[in-house]
Structures are given as structure tokens and as C-alpha cells.
Image (spheres, rainbow, N blue to C red):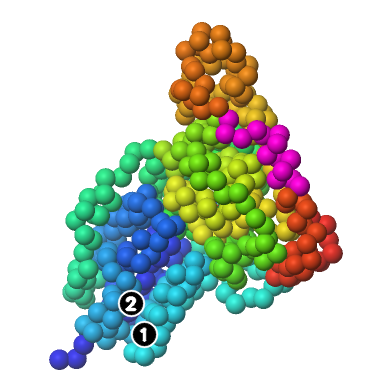
Amino acid sequence: MPKQKINIVWLKRDIRTQDHLPLRQAELSGIPYLIIYCFEPTLISYPDTSVRHLQFIYNSLISTNNKLADYDRHINICYAESSIVFSDLIRVYDVQQVFSYKESGTEITWHRDRIISKLLRQHQVRWNQYNKDGVIRGIKNRQNWDKNWYVVMSKPPIHNAYTHDNSKLQSHTEFPLPEDLLEQLVSYPKQYQPAGEENAWKYLRSFTYDRGRNYHRHISKPTESRLSCGRISPYLAWGNISVKQAYQHIKTHKHYVSNKRAFTGIMTRLKWHCHFIQKFEVECRYETACINRGYEDLGFTNDDTYLTAWKKGLTGYPLVDACMRCLTHTGWINFRMRAMLVSFLCHHLDQDWRRGVYHIAQLFLDYEPGIHYPQFQMQAGTTGVNTVRIYNVVKQSQDHDIEGVFIKKWVPELRNVPKEFIHEPWTMTYMDQKLLGVTLGEDYPMPIVDLQTSARAAREKIYGHRKDSKVRKERVRILETHTRRRPNQRDS
Ligand SMILES: Cc1cc2nc3c(=O)[nH]c(=O)nc-3n(C[C@H](O)[C@H](O)[C@H](O)COP(=O)(O)OP(=O)(O)OC[C@H]3O[C@@H](n4cnc5c(N)ncnc54)[C@H](O)[C@@H]3O)c2cc1C
């Protein structure tokens, strides 16, 4: 009996039903199609991945399946390497075409994609891969990139229409999730943003309706930003919504004119989202190697006790500790607090950025390799083309958590400490501590480093190294590849 002809839609970081080109092309292809998502053991055991990512993905898949059920369709959720799933599908069916978005991922996903490409070629299966969110594969520089991005963003989003699947195509249940993993994925912790397309729109609509009014005023405040920021990052990262959908929703919203400053602010950042992913698309080695190769020669003390204190939120610097604990619990903190955590790790604690980069990746519910690694390195000062910011964590605290509300929420050991001491509790006398019921060094640590000394040492080290000939040579290459600036332009 001849095998049934089918096509396959392979979902990765694009778990949604609308503005989805691979799904539309499959619908138009005129033959039955299967939709698959693979939880791949090699990828999910990689150190950048955590259970919270898998929980978000799984719950996004389930909510997508609820929508597709209206058309007797669903995503086949497989637990296996994608090469095994494709081999099996090719064995059972006469697979004609595969539709997917291009993934601007880490080296391990590129390696996986090369294997799949070879496998599909061997079996004369055509793999149609589409550009995602204005990110372009194979470009050598940024000539016309911005212009092209605006062209992509202004095109109408795809309205995906679905036919009923009357083909009796067998769903593929050969690769079920192991029971223990499934148990973890099903119970989605309440403290994380809820997953899925509907929730993506709920967050976006509430931003444009009223939450976003104070976006630009609160963006750096650890407490207020939780309400005023878009909070759409996990949905963009796992593709519950496309950048174009978000961009157009904000741009055409009836509140756009009255909230112009806030709305243009978030729209600019949507472009940054793609700008950073484009960098990583061109050079995914930024996951493990310094963007500017000249910084590979920089030495670090790499003290393990400091690293552990940072990871646990026990550095003795209240805002740093509050941020790490909040991130650990909820999966989100704002941009400035992320930058501060990295700056503190790499500059004040003198750690190689690679010692913290996976820890934070695992904690971010919105982990997006294309943004994460270039941003992490910018804050670590290893690009050689950006201004190095060595954050004064006490000043950040005084400026952005004036009353210490955020600190007291996440560092309850300090809940009775008044605002004059909350940013620098070590300035309390022994008597103050006794009266307030907190003993530094017992209930909460004394600062693990002296801020002035560590900042001075970091400044000398990182600024001194900028003059290194290798750093300067690399700087020219980086500017030519990733920016539209001339190499002799000043940093910004
Ligand atoms: C060390 C470090 C690591 C980061 N890692 C990630 C990551 O893994 N995933 C991620 O989505 N963002 C990352 N960011 C960028 C930024 O902090 C988050 O995008 C933002 O805080 C998400 O919250 P939001 O959706 O409310 O953002 P909003 O301010 O509402 O912005 C809307 C969207 O624009 C994009 N965006 C905002 N700021 C930036 C930025 N500085 N660079 C690039 N895109 C931006 C995001 O997609 C965001 O969802 C990182 C920043 C730093 C300093």
C-alpha cells in the first residue's frame, strides 16, 4: 500500500495560531499536514534550559491545542530528538515538505538543524524555512537592515484560517513525555506569567489600555515596572505573539496619540529585540566566547564564595539580593535590574561572565538567546564598542527603590529597617540593629566586597584593556558587522 502523502509543520519558538507563515503555507499546500513540537533531550538538558522554560512551552502548546481542537487539529507533542521524530515520520508517511521558521539559536540548535537538513535532503523532503520577525539569515553587515525591518513590520499580519482535518491522519503518539516530566510540566507555578497566545494578548491589551501610561517613567523602578512595562517578553520569546502583531497593535491603538512617549518607547524596544537577535543570528559563538576576542585575555579572580552569594541573593547589598530573589521566584525583573545584577557579578565580584550567564538564562522566563548573550556581554564590558557601566548598586537602590519597598518584599530579614538605613544596612550601629531586631552577619550578611574598592579595580582593569591592540582591531570588525556606524565613530 502506498504511503500517505503529508506535509509537516515544525514548531519551535513560534507557538501560536495567528500571524504564522509555516501554518499558512501548510494549509495552502493542499495535502494533509501534521504539526509537531519536539522536547529534545539534548536541548532540554543543556545548561541554558530550566524546568520553568519547559513549563511555559508545554502550557503554550496545550492552549494552542485547545484552539486547534475546533478544526480537529492538534500539535503532536513529542519527547525525542527531532532527527528521530522526522526519521519515524518519513518511515510511516510519504513526507513531501516541512514548514518552519528559521531559529536564531545557540550552536547546539544550529547543529541539530544541520542534521535535519541532511536527513530531509536524503529523503527528498523539501524544507521551507522562513525568516522570523525581520531577522535575516546570511547577511554580512547591516546595510538596509533597519529599512527592511520597518517594511516587514508594516505588512499586514497573516490571518491564519484553518480547514477541518478530515484526513483521518493518525496523530503521532510514539514519543510520549516521560511521566515524571509530564507531572512537572502540568503543574504550572502561579508566580510565573501565564503561558499561551490568549495571555499574550491579555498582557499586550492591558498595556495599551492603561498599564503602559507610565511606561517611560517607571521602566527602571523595580516595583512599579512590574505593572507599567509591557511584560510581553515571555510571549515574544516563545512565539505566543509575533513582534509584528505587538508592534502594529501598539502603533494603531486609539491611545497611541495620548501615550506617544510611552508607546514609541516600547516600539523602539521591539526593534532592539530583533536587532539583538540579528547579531546572534550572524555569530552564535557569543554564547561562549567574548564578542570582542581581545577580552579573552582578561583575567578574573572567580571566587566561588562570591558567585554562590550572588546566586543565592546573599551578597549583603540589599537591592542586588532583592533582585536575584525576585527573579528566582517570579522569572522577571526589569532591564536596569538585570543589567545591575550582571554588572555587579562581572565588575564588583570580578567574575568571568560565563560563570553567571546560564544561571540567569535559566531564571528568565523570557530567555531568548539572541538577546541574552549579547546583552549579558554588553553589561560585562566584553564588546569593546559599548560604554561600560559599572553600576553603583547603592545609588541604584536610592534612586529606584527610594522607600525600600522592593527590598523589604524580597529581603524580609530587613523588613523593620527604616529607609535611612535600608540601602546601606551596614551603617547601622550595634544598638540600631538590636532595636530593629536584625543582626548583620547573622540574619543578613555584611557586604561581601567594598563597593568603592571593587569599582576602582574594575574601572582600571576594563578601561585599561580597551587600549589593547587586539581589542581595537576587533572593535572595527564588530562595528562593520553589527552596526551602520563608521568604525571611527565614538562609542554611545
Ligand atoms: C543581561 C540581560 C539579559 C537579558 N536577557 C533577555 C532575554 O533573555 N530575553 C528578553 O526578552 N530580554 C532580555 N533582556 C532585555 C530586557 O531586559 C527584557 O526584554 C525586558 O526587561 C522584558 O520585559 P518587558 O516585556 O516588560 O519589556 P518592555 O520594556 O515592555 O519591552 C517590550 C519588548 O521589547 C524587547 N526589549 C525590551 N528591552 C530590550 C532590550 N534592552 N534589548 C532587547 N530587547 C528588548 C523585549 O522583547 C520586550 O518584551 C536582557 C537584558 C539584560 C540586561
Q: Which residues are magenta?
A: 447-460
- Residue drawn at 35 percent across, 51 percent down: 51
Q: Earlier in the sequence, mark 2 or mark 1?
A: 2
**Residue type marked 2:** Ser
- Residue drawn at 40 percent across, 85 percent down: 118
Q: Main secondary structure of the magenta part?
A: helix
Asked whether the residues under the numbered discs 2 and 1 touch, taking CB atoms below 8 Å apart as contact, a structural biologist would say: yes
Number of residues whose C-alpha sits closer than 10 Å to that of mark 1, classed few (under 14), some (14–19) or many (20 or more): some
Q: Is residue 443 above or below residue 227?
A: above
The picture places residue 12, in percent across and down from the top left corner, at 40, 65
- Residue drawn at 34 percent across, 38 percent down: 190
The picture places residue 289, in percent across and down from the top left corner, at 59, 64
Q: Is residue 14 above or below residue 85?
A: above
**Disc 2/disc 1 C-alpha distance (Å):** 8 Å
* Residue 449 drawn in magenta: yes
Secondary structure beneath label 2: helix
Query: Which of 362 and 136 lies nearest the eye of the viewer?
Result: 362
The picture places residue 218, in percent across and down from the top left corner, at 61, 34
Looking at the image, residue 462 sits to the left or right of residue 153; the answer is right
For the N terminus, give its image quadrant.
bottom left
